[in-house]
Amino acid sequence: MAQKTLDKAVKKGVLKANTASRYLSRLSTKVATPKTEKKITKKKAVKKVAKKVAKK
């Protein structure tokens, strides 16, 4: 659905082709990555912050 909308915007001249392509690329990578990876990175970030606070 998003591809169709972006293609229409390019045809009407609202967006440039490269911009629409970039948006589609970013969207497809967000859809392709599983949500579990994001949770793991958040946990690691919390641990790093906790260690820095503990050192002070």
Image (cartoon, rainbow, N blue to C red):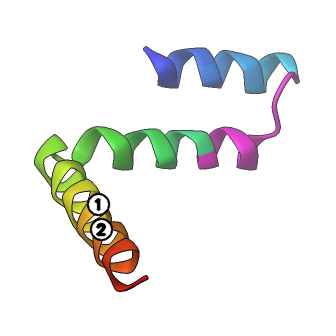
**Between 30 and 25, the one nearer to me in the picture:** 30
Q: Which residue is drawn at 82% across and 39% down?
A: 16
Secondary structure state at the residue bearing disc 2: helix
Secondary structure state at the residue bearing disc 1: helix
The percent position of residue 29, horizontal first and vertical second, equals: 36, 50
The percent position of residue 26, horizontal first and vertical second, equals: 49, 47
Alpha-carbon neighbours of circle 1 within 10 Å: few (<14), some, or many (≥20)?
few
Res 15 label: none
Q: Which amino acid does label 2 sit on?
A: Ala
Query: Which quarter of the rendered picture does the C terminus lie within?
Result: bottom left
The percent position of residue 35, horizontal first and vertical second, equals: 17, 42
For the residues marked 1 and 2, what is the alpha-carbon distance in whole angstroms? 6 Å
Q: Residue at x 29, y 77 (%)?
A: 51
Q: Give the range drawn in magenta.
A: 14-22
- Residue highlighted by disc 1: 46
Residue 32, compared with residue 14, is above or below; it is below
Q: Which residue is drawn at 88% across and 24% down?
A: 13
Residue 48, compared with residue 43, is above or below; it is below
Q: Which amino acid does label 1 sit on?
A: Val
The quarter of the picture where residue 53 lies is: bottom left
**Between 24 and 42, the one nearer to me in the picture:** 42
**Between 5 and 26, the one nearer to me in the picture:** 26
The furthest residue to the bottom: 55
Please say if the residues under marks 1 and 2 sit with CB atoms less than 8 Å apart: yes
**Between 53 and 7, the one nearer to me in the picture:** 53
- Residue highlighted by disc 2: 50
